[in-house]
Image (spheres, helix red, strand yellow):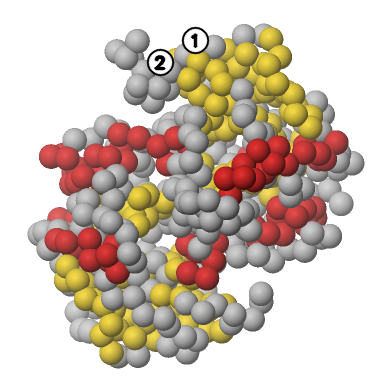
Amino acid sequence: MKRGRIAFNGAIHEVRPAGQEGLLRLADGRVLREDEALWLPPVQPGTIFALGLNYADHARELAFKAPEQPLVFLKGPNALVGHRALTPRPAEAEYMHYECELAVVIGRQARNVARGQAYDYVAGYTVANDYAIRDYLENYYRPNLRVKNRDACTPLGPWLVDAADVADPMNLALRTLVNGRQTQAGNTRDMVFDIPWLIEYLSGIMTLSPGDIILTGTPEGLVNVQAGDEVVTEIEGIGRLVNTLIEDNAN
Amino acid sequence: MTRRLPAAYLDANVNHPFTGFTPPGRVYGVVLNDLDSLQALAPAFADAPYKAPPKAPVMYIKPANTLAPSGATVTLPPGARRVQVGATLGVVLAAPAARLRADDAMAAVAGWRAVADLSLPHDSYYRPAIREKCFDGSCVLAATVAPAGALRPDALRVQTFINGAQVDEWPLSRLARGIPELLRDVTAFMTLSPGDLLLAGVRWQAPVAQAGDQVAVRIHGVGELSFSLALQEGKA
């Protein structure tokens, strides 16, 4: 099952796909076009984890060796926005790029979970676009929050897809299109640390709770994006997440 | 101006599944925000991996699993026998805070809370310290929030006690960014929400406590907290 969260007509609703591309259905049966809804992130987030350098090709692209330990960083809820939202791009920034990532949503409290049981703790999956503004990278707790935890710079959605409906999350094609042109392509099978490994690792460090989200990293294919660009991050069977960049002159 | 505390403090029915008490909002901290750390590390900043002194606040997140009430017993992660006790002042946000100026930042503050931010000792600040800073119970919060008012944060002193003996005292006048400047620089790119807690910074070479110790943190005029440290069972 796929579930989305939207605001519509002054209230928040859980919605489902209505069968036909681009349509969605409210619980009371009303059907909307997806552009009539204001999309929210499909999950109210607990702790948000993200992985850096978790695809070997992407690590090479950034001139890093794939790590022996995962590079994990955290985000706050301020970073999240839903499907079809606008993301501000600082006017002064020289290099801002998207990152198409499979997001794993935890469904049960998890502590010291072994790899073999890890999928039992997954509620479902969604798509994340983990934008980074490389101008603000500093070598302290890198990637630092100013790069990765900016307001509205992590689109998430549109749907939370039940784990039971995803036969093999470690074999999904992902890609990014900028203004309709494909700029990034990969497959989740190329993760350095796969989903069961990450759940074992993180739950060995700390207790995970329902609503926690793990963004599992991105493959190669980074391109600088500009205000006005439409960026679509898409994962096979999970969803197609649309975002548009707007100029931010606040700084 | 008096501000009401966020409702999260008042709703005792909302318990975090792990810690069993009402968490505040999100908790953010900063390292390298004291003059002594900056001075001690200045020679290292030019070298790899840092290559330049820090510009923005060096932030980290203490996620929900780390939050523990005063009085808690904190179990050390497997293999760990000691922790650094980063005794500090938590700034409790009253209102959504974005793009604050230093001169209006204090209006967003609901109050102050004593906090013990525990870390496994680590020498490198290059990568996010998840294993070192995010273990269960590693952020102990005082029971009370002192309302913002006449109290001047830069006049406060943070005391740490281990097994009843004072082992440390540091004045918040040693912060590199004071509270208004810290709020300005953090909210320049991220919005803080009512109930969120921004930790002011920990001192250079904070005291180290070990399994079996009783630890207390006191900020006169703000509040105090205590906790004990235990080894992971079967790891003694």
Q: Residue at x 58, y 49 (%)?
A: B45
Left or right of residue A118, residue B213 in this image:
right
* Above or below B205: residue A62: below
Give me the C-alpha separation between circle 2 and circle 1: 8 Å
Residue type at mark 2: give it: Leu
Q: Measured from the top left, where is residue A230 in percent x and y?
A: 39, 86
Tell me which residue sits at (45%, 68%) in the image. A132
Circles 2 and 1: CB atoms closer than 8 Å: yes
Pointer 1 residue:
B212
User: Is there any visible trace of residue A11 in the rendered image?
Assistant: no
In front: B220, or B38?
Answer: B38
What kind of element bears circle 2?
loop
Q: Residues within 10 Å of mark 2 (few under 14, many from 20)?
A: some
State the image coordinates of residue A24 (x, y, percent, origin top left). 30, 78
Location of mark 2 (residue): B231
Task: Using the rendered view, name the quadrant where residue B223 is placed.
Answer: top right
